[in-house]
Image (cartoon, rainbow, N blue to C red):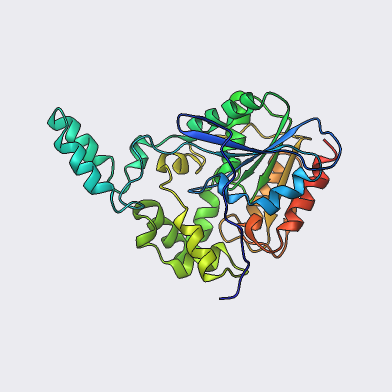
Amino acid sequence: MEGTTYDWSDATVFDAEPGWSMAPEEPTGGPPRDFDILFVHGMASGGWIWKPDFLARFTGQGYRVWTLTLPGRLSGPTMRTDPTALPRAACAAFRAGSPTEAVSILTSVMPGAGVIDGPSLDDFADALNAALAAIGRPVVTVGHSLGGAVAQNNARRNGWPHGIALICSAPPYGMWRASAQMAVTNPPLWKALMEYSLFGLAHSDHHVMRHNLFPNGVGDQDYLTFVNQLRDESLTATAGASGLPPFAPMPGPRQNIMILGAGRDRLVPALDIWLTAAWYGRQPVILPKAGHMPMLEAGREALAEELLGWMEGL
């Protein structure tokens, strides 16, 4: 399948606390800026999702940018993403000091264990807040998908940053409406996402996932590299993004927020982008030909241009 070629090299980690990490890219041109930019990834990915050529559009305009990798489960991956998880857990359970401890170790690697012991959406927001504090100057937070829910939750819990940009983001009222629409209009994708959440990539329909995440096409090797870097996401956090309990600030006009959607997004439909924009009293920007992963598509230059144009007015 014909698609875009990506550079998947990772940035150097600048700073790390237990469970999360952050990497910087220094400005390479442009005027001095009054704020930095922090990019927050979506479900199951990491700071690697923001590729060097995309970030270079911002550093070339004078911005220092940061990529945040949110915390994972302290007990590590489950069987759904790591085939060695069960043997390793069995060895640890054999050395456990009590039957209760052994059962706890074995349970921690079972599919679905992340709904019990994974970090919550609030934990993600606290990690984001710690990252903002570590940067130590005004920051615009750019959140993609689940990362948008994290950015909104942090704004509710810890105060609004210099600005927030939401890209194909979970709406402030949660993903329940989009999920219900998907179950009716695109049941294969709904089923594939549920299978991925519970049982991992090995039990997911890759044809469905690939077609819906990358509606404009992606090369075989690029897709394989992409999925091999996906991690065992916390089901606690993704359940929190459903909107119950509420995670976002109360509705009301906001001047320092940008809402971006994608015309070919099969996960967060245009209606939810418009409703998110209405929640914050803004006009959304829709990239008509983009899918749910616009920062990985050939047209990601348009995404960068929209963000840069908005940031000029902050």
In the image, residue 206 sits, relative to residue 80, either above or below, namely below
Decide if residue 24 is on the left or right side of residue 92.
Answer: right
Does residue 246 appear in the picture of this structure? Answer: no
Choose between 65 and 267: the one closer to the eye: 65
Query: Residue drawn 47% across and 39% down?
Result: 240
Does residue 154 appear in the picture of this structure? Answer: yes
- Indicate the quadrant where residue 172 lies: top right
- Indicate the quadrant where residue 62 lies: top right
Query: Residue drawn 75% across and 57% down?
Result: 301
Name the image quarter holding the N terminus.
bottom right
Choose between 11 and 238: the one closer to the eye: 11
Q: Residue 297: where, in percent of width, then height?
A: 65, 62
Name the image quarter holding the C terminus.
top right
Decide if residue 29 is on the left or right side of residue 261.
Answer: right
Choose between 218 and 237: the one closer to the eye: 218
In the image, residue 45 sits, relative to residue 299, either above or below, namely above
Q: Residue 35: where, in percent of width, then height?
A: 76, 31
Q: Residue 235: where, in percent of width, then height?
A: 41, 43
Decide if residue 255 is on the left or right side of residue 129.
Answer: right
Query: Residue drawn 64% across and 64% down?
Result: 264
In the image, residue 75 sits, relative to residue 264, either above or below, namely above
Query: Residue drawn 13% across and 28% down?
Result: 98
Decide if residue 125 is on the left or right side of residue 202.
Answer: right
